[in-house]
Amino acid sequence: MKSWAVVALAAAVIVSAPSPAAAAHPAEVFRVDPLVDGAIVAGAGLANLVPWLLEDRIIDLRCPCDEGEVNPLDRWAIGLHSDAAAHASQATLFLALLAPPLADWAVLGGSRAFLQDLTVFAETLAVSGALTTLAKYTSQRPIPRAYEGQPAYLREPGSYRAFWSGHTSATVAALTDAAWTIRLRYGERRWPWLVAAVGGASVGVERVWGGHHFPTDVVVGFVAGAAVGTAVPLLHARGGPARLALAPLGGGLALVGRF
């Protein structure tokens, strides 16, 4: 699946959005606490940054590795190493990160509703990134190119962070967050989810074809991104067709929702 398809869909997002005149008094669909949400974003940001700064001490550069240790479902991906696909995955990711806030700003301007949307979007990406970082540095799975024995990848710490795919999880988290924002504000139920599905599938295929991930890496990354991209905006939702909340259950808390 080519990234140009995501470009076309993103353009459709911008074109389909209501005009600024129609959104002169845009509904504020999120509740945001600057201190709490700022602390979450900062904490998650540190959880992303610190392991990366210390990766030379954390990562075990254990390859050359035996291809036989890779499960049959993933093994076929060893040998795929398209640089064009790898570059396309970068473009798809950047598009997913930039298009939603830019489209939102084009409609809402610098309103309080836009700043609330942006805060929730940033928190979604920060939490998604923190969970991805935890998975990567805990599992330390080599990427397919490392199993090929390519010298440039054997001694590179980044070659031991295959699981799960950060490109896929970030892309899906960003687009899912945007889809929920659009649904809560405008009631849209179809095309935003098509954008999220196509964008996530596109970057996943590109990462596998580029030799940087196995299929299970991108599948789990897709699911993780969708989960965070749903949980964060719905936990901030003021109300409407869908909402998540924390409720007491027994001796702890449970996540309950209305859809």
Image (cartoon, helix red, strand yellow):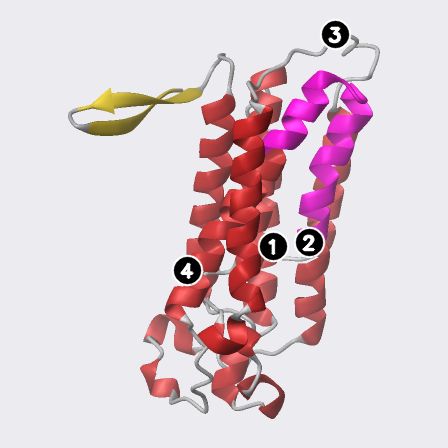
Query: Mark 3 or 2 closer to N-term?
Result: 3
State the image coordinates of residue 214 (x, y, percent, origin top left). Answer: 46, 69
Q: Residue at x 77, y 20 (%)?
A: 108
Task: Name the residue tied to disc 1.
Answer: 202
Q: Is residue 94 magenta?
A: yes
Q: Is residue 49 above or below residue 211?
A: above
Crowd tier of the residue under label 2, counting other residues whose Cα lies within 10 Å: few below 14, some 14–19, many 20 or above: many
Residue position for label 2: 92
Residue linked to disc 3: 25
Please identify, in this view, whether the residue under mark 4 or under mark 1 is nearer the observer: 4
Q: Residue furthest top?
A: 25
Q: Which residues are magenta?
A: 92-120
Q: CA distance from mark 1 to mark 3?
A: 35 Å
Task: Bin the neighbour count of mark 1 within 10 Å (Cα to Cα): few under 14, some 14-19, many 20 and up.
Answer: many
Residue 135 circle label: 4
- For marks 2 and 4 on the same chain, the one whose residue lies earlier in the sequence: 2
Q: Amino acid at mark 4?
A: Ala
Type of residue at label 3?
Answer: His
